[in-house]
Image (cartoon, grey):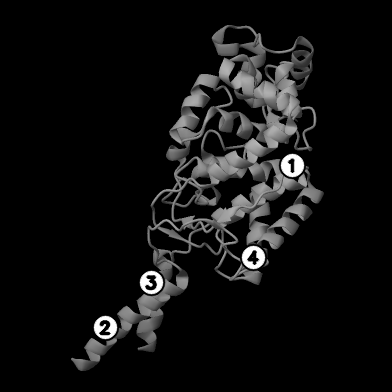
Amino acid sequence: MRHASFTATSLILYLFLFLLRRGTLTTGEITPLRRGFYAGVCPEAEQIVRETMRRAMTKEARSGASVMRLQFHDCFVNGCDGSLLLDDTPTMIGEKLALSNINSLRSFEVIDEVKEALEKACPGVVSCADIIIMAARDAVVLSGGPNWEVKLGRKDSLSASQEASDNIMPSPRSNATFLINLFHKFNLSITDLVALSGSHSIGMGRCFSIVFRLYNQFGTGRPDPHMDPRFRFKLNRLCPESGDGNITGRLDATQTKFDNQYFKDLRMQRGFLNSDQTLFSGDARTMAVVKRYSIDQNAFFADFVEGMVKLGDLQIDQPVEIRRNCRVVNNAPREEIGEALASFMLEA
């Protein structure tokens, strides 16, 4: 009986240590965010992220805009928790297949490269959620935009939800009123909305997202009237009605430089997406902010930084961990636990 009791106790202890080693024991508390969070435990973390982003953008300039978009798409869905990065599993359909993300979000491999470098330098320390925040900031800086100190200390979710993303992420067809109300739910102001939309100062958009504007705006059978005719002619050639929806066009006239050209384009009715042009053409409140940014780049930069910090503050109370691989949670699959149990029983 004593041997049986010892074996059972040892088994429980073994499983506890096994799961702890796998990183599955987590809590739901929200860690306070602060600047310099990794200074004492991984002082080179931010430099590693910056240099990895520099190499990625040298290889492909568009990756900067792609990585920057990840912050918005991650943080709006259950907070900034890295859930966007999780691949699907047999029991979970994640956010990568959500309507606003599928065939649209890209450069996940850049995050993988950053994570791999950080795991070599500081294993198990830097979360994937924080990598998104740092990499998004660096994408802006390396594109000529403002620099700022990011608050860090987030941890990674244990799950993701396509449904949650579909229920919250806006469509490129969205109008200003919808966007204002959506941002208000997150305590983000009209100024935050317009400033953060300025992230489209860099990057490309798909024809799929604008075909309706060109040929059947809101079911009228006509193009969007808030579009410069010469600009529409260029887009008609780029995006024929029955053409390839994955062809891409520039979101503004200087698509690799982070500047205020985006707002100048909106004033000239040359916004690529409906959700962009509506900020100038669809509401007087957002129009006023667009006008200000089009003539004052410093004001845009300052408000953009404030908006990114506020966006990065979004968190919810949920079970979390620090993933070793941003695409999968640390939890051991059932079969792996079974193999560990079998191994233990053979050794006992």
Instruction: Classify mark 1: residues with Cα within 10 Å, few (<14), some (14-19) or many (20+).
Output: some
Of the residues tagged 1 and 3, which is closer to the observer? 1
Please indicate whether residue 153 sits to the left or right of residue 247 in the image: left
Residue 134 drawn at (x, y percent): 64, 53
Q: Nearer the viewer, mark 2 or mark 3?
A: 2
Marks 4 and 1, how far apart at CA: 25 Å
Tell me residue 79's x, y (percent).
Answer: 47, 46
Residue 38 falls left or right of residue 156: right
First reached walking from the N terminus: tag 1 or tag 2: 2
Tell me if residue 221 can be seen: yes
Q: Which residue is mark 2?
A: 8
Q: Which residue is mark 4?
A: 118
How crowded pointer 4 is (Cα within 10 Å; few <14, some 14-19, many 20+) is rated as many
The residue wearing badge 1 is 145
Establish if 269 lies above or below 339.
above
Q: Nearer the viewer, mark 1 or mark 2?
A: 1
The CA distance from mark 3 to mark 4 is 31 Å
The disc placed on residue 338 is 3
Q: Residue at x 57, y 45 (%)?
A: 309
| Residue mark closest to the camera, 4 vs 2 | 4
Mark 1 element type: loop
Give the residue at the far bottom of this rendering: 2
Query: Could you tell me the amino acid type at mark 3?
Result: Gly
> Alpha-carbon distance for marks 4 and 2?
39 Å
First-in-chain label (3 vs 4): 4
Instruction: Tell me the quadrant of the picture where the N terminus can be found.
Output: bottom left
Q: Nearer the viewer, residue 309 or 257?
A: 309
Q: Give 307 or 275, whichever is nearer the viewer.
A: 307
Q: Position of residue 245 (x, y in %)?
A: 67, 27
